[in-house]
């Protein structure tokens, strides 16, 4: 048996396999929640804002657990951290699925969905809190390669869940739509969750590297918070993950408008990332971690430029290939550099790097791209030849939307489900329409 070379009875192979499998619920939930968000909107009459809050919890919920619980890892240890991750996964997924019993009360159902999404995301974050320092402790002389292998399981899960989700979307007439239902699709996540819990939780965990080296927690905090390179790497991670996850959140939505299956495009990006991370050792040997980041930046930039010019399936998948090659190495390689170049930062340096990256993606990357899209739409409508058409459409909307508001206000819960919108949705649209007309008339 492959055992770590220390005084603890640690089975290195089983531990690493277990923590890698623990990333599968994270990636599967990311893909499947995106896949069923339309069903959730329809069943619980959610606004776009509410649906966005549920989807966005995947990023900021992870960031909270990384930034709040992560720095305390040295105190409670990695074994308890893994148990917290499992509890978050199990409780969060169960709460989300249980919202089906509140379909008669959409307001209460939204809060149950939201609470479940936050707990699920917290579990995802705890896997990052535990998995990265655990990998570094298990493989102290091969950190970047093993961290890339560990993070290969995230795109692997997105790939598998994406294909499963796409297949289930085509089964609306099978078994009365049972397999297509959002409850069944989310329930699939229980399978990898139970497998990793059975494999990982009974194991003996090693101490973190700093604990094993006898470095006091106070010294770890002092070194981490005063080293200039640490702040530079935090900035690099914030930019890199905003580009990766911010773009990934919008790519399926944008290209679905061009007739390209968004979930398959995301699955293709995940496939490219998974393959490259599985073979990261070859790149580490030839390019070094900083060289890998330079190459990743080039391919990511090229992919985004190609996305901006894509007009169909072939060009979209070509752009996705370049983009996938680029973003494959960002997250694990930056974490590896922190652990290798700044070893005294210990688990704190790792979790801060992960947390800042995810927080930046959720707070800046995703909404920032949306803001850019809004501004481009305004510029498009202001162009010559389109202004009169835009004004005519806005005048028509101003005249007809009040009727939709009245209809929604008078509808019952079941009638609202058939309508597919709430009065508040239309009221916001009406307010925006009137604001735009005011600007055009001035």
Image: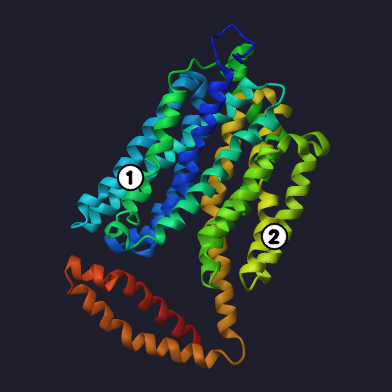
The N terminus: image quadrant: top right
Residue 225 left/right relative to 399: right
Q: Is residue 230 visible?
A: yes
Q: Is residue 389 above or below residue 82?
A: below
Q: Is residue 130 visible?
A: no
Q: Is residue 371 above or below residue 5?
A: below
Task: Look at 66% across and 52% down and name the residue there.
Answer: 324
Residue 53 left/right relative to 362: left
Q: Which residue is mark 2?
A: 303
Q: Nearer the viewer, residue 162 or 285?
A: 162
Q: Is residue 346 above or below residue 175?
A: above
Where in the figure is residue 9, as x and y percent of width and height?
Answer: 54, 9
Considering every residue shown, the one lying at the far right of the view is 286
Residue 32 left/right relative to 243: left
Q: Nearer the viewer, residue 402 or 84?
A: 84
**Contact (Cβ within 8 Å) of mark 2 with mark 1:** no
Where in the figure is residue 389, as x and y percent of width and height?
Answer: 50, 91
Considering every residue shown, the one lying at the far front of the view is 174
Q: Determine the secondary structure under disc 2.
A: helix
Q: Determine the secondary structure under disc 1.
A: helix
Q: Nearer the viewer, residue 276 or 45?
A: 276
Q: Nearer the viewer, mark 2 or mark 1?
A: 2
- In the rendered image, which quarter is residue 276 located in? top right
Where in the figure is residue 68, as x and y percent of width and height?
Answer: 47, 33
Task: Look at 40% across and 82% down and name the residue there.
Answer: 434
Label 1, residues with CA under 10 Å away: few <14, some 14-19, many ≥20: some
Residue 21 left/right relative to 409: right
Where in the figure is residue 422, as x and y percent of width and height?
Answer: 28, 69
Quick one: label 2 or label 1, which is nearer the N terminus?
1
* Tag of residue 49: none
How far is disc 2 from disc 1 in space, using C-alphas? 36 Å
Q: Which residue is mark 1?
A: 115
């Amino acid at each position: 048996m492959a055992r770590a070379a220390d005084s603890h009875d640690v089975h290195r192979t089983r531990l690493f396999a277990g923590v890698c499998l623990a990333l599968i619920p994270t990636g599967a939930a990311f893909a499947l929640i995106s896949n069923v968000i339309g069903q959730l909107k329809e069943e619980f009459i959610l606004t776009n804002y509410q649906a966005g809050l549920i989807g966005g919890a995947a990023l900021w919920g992870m960031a909270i657990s990384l930034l709040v619980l992560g720095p305390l890892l040295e105190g409670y240890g990695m074994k308890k951290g893994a148990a917290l991750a499992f509890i978050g996964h199990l409780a969060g997924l169960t709460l989300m699925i249980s919202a089906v019993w509140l379909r008669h009360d959409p307001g209460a159902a939204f809060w149950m969905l939201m609470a479940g999404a936050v707990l699920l995301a917290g579990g995802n974050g705890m896997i990052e809190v535990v998995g990265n320092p655990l990998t570094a402790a298990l493989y102290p002389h091969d950190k970047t390669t093993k961290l890339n292998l560990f993070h290969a399981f995230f795109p692997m899960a997105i790939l598998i869940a994406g294909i499963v989700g796409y297949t289930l979307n085509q089964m609306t007439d099978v078994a009365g739509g049972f397999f297509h239902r959002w409850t069944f699709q989310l329930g699939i996540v229980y399978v990898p969750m139970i497998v990793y819990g059975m494999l990982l939780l009974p194991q003996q965990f090693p101490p973190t590297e700093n604990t094993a080296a006898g470095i006091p927690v106070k010294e770890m905090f002092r070194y981490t918070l005063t080293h200039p390179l640490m702040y530079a790497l935090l900035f690099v991670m914030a930019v890199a993950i905003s580009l990766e996850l911010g773009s990934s959140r919008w790519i399926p939505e944008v290209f679905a408008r061009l007739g390209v299956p968004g979930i398959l495009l995301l699955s293709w990006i995940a496939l490219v990332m998974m393959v490259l991370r599985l073979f990261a050792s070859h790149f580490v040997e030839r390019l070094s971690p900083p060289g890998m980041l330079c190459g990743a930046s080039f391919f990511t930039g090229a992919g985004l430029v190609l996305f901006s010019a894509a007009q169909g399936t072939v060009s979209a998948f070509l752009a996705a290939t370049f983009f996938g090659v680029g973003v494959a190495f960002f997250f694990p390689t930056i974490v590896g550099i922190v652990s290798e170049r700044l070893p005294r930062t210990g688990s704190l340096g790792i979790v801060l790097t992960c947390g800042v990256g995810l927080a930046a993606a959720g707070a800046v990357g995703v909404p920032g791209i949306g803001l850019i899209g809004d501004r481009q739409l305004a510029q498009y409508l202001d162009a010559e030849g389109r202004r009169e058409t835009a004004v005519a459409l806005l005048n028509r909307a101003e005249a007809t939307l009040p009727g939709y508001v009245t209809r929604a206000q008078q509808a019952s819960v079941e009638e609202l489900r058939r309508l597919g919108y709430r009065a508040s949705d239309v009221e916001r649209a009406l307010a925006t329409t009137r604001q735009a007309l005011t600007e055009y008339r001035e």
